[in-house]
Image (cartoon, rainbow, N blue to C red):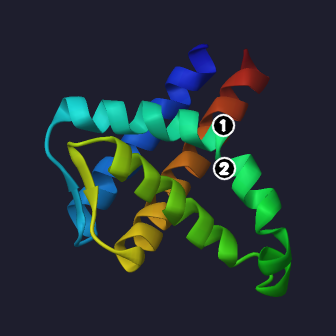
Amino acid sequence: MARFVLRAVFAALGLWVASRIVPGVVVTSTGSLIAAALLLGIVNALVRPIVVILTLPLTLLTLGLFLLVVNAMMIGLVAVLLQGFQVHGLVPGVLAAIVTGFASWIGNAAIKDGRREG
């Protein structure tokens, strides 16, 4: 459970950075940001694996680049489900997916390093 919370913190950080640097991504409050990060974690755990399997041929055809669109779709789904988080279009969604993915990558590296030392 602690790892999920830590991943949600890095997702929230990524969404916050995306809302600051990507035009078209809007977070109205801190509560919405936290809710979006938690909901993104749940959506990535439940919905994303199904979508990845269904789009596997297209992902292979594009050499994995379609996964950016899948990640943008997951962020868009969170925006549809949550009122205080908005993504206006595919390009802002893809850019937010890149920023959030980078923040999550850093978070995963920090979690792994902490687990090795501890």
Where 45 falls versus 52 (above or below)? above
Q: Position of residue 36 (x, y in %)?
A: 36, 39
Q: Which element type, helix, strand or loop, lies under badge 1?
A: helix
User: Residue at 83% across / 69% down in the picture?
Assistant: 56
Q: Amino acid at mark 1?
A: Ala
Residue that mark 2 sits on: 48
User: Residue at 70% across / 32% down in the picture?
Assistant: 113
Rounded to the nearest whole Å, what is the CA distance between mark 1 and mark 2? 6 Å
Residue that mark 1 sits on: 45
Where 30 falls versus 28 (above or below)? above
Where 13 falls versus 42 (above or below)? below
Left/right placement of residue 104 relative to residue 37 reads right
Q: Amino acid at mark 2?
A: Arg
Mark 1 surroundings: few (<14), some (14-19) or many (≥20) residues within 10 A: few
Q: Tell me if I can see residue 10 in this picture.
A: no
- Total number of numbered labels? 2
Left/right placement of residue 18 relative to residue 24 reads right
Mark 2 surroundings: few (<14), some (14-19) or many (≥20) residues within 10 A: some
Where 77 falls versus 110 (above or below)? below
User: Residue at 34% across / 51% down in the picture?
Assistant: 79
Mark 1 touches mark 2? (CB < 8 Å): yes
Q: Nearer the viewer, residue 76 or 95?
A: 76
Q: Nearer the viewer, residue 9 or 33?
A: 33
Q: Position of residue 110 (x, y in %)?
A: 61, 36
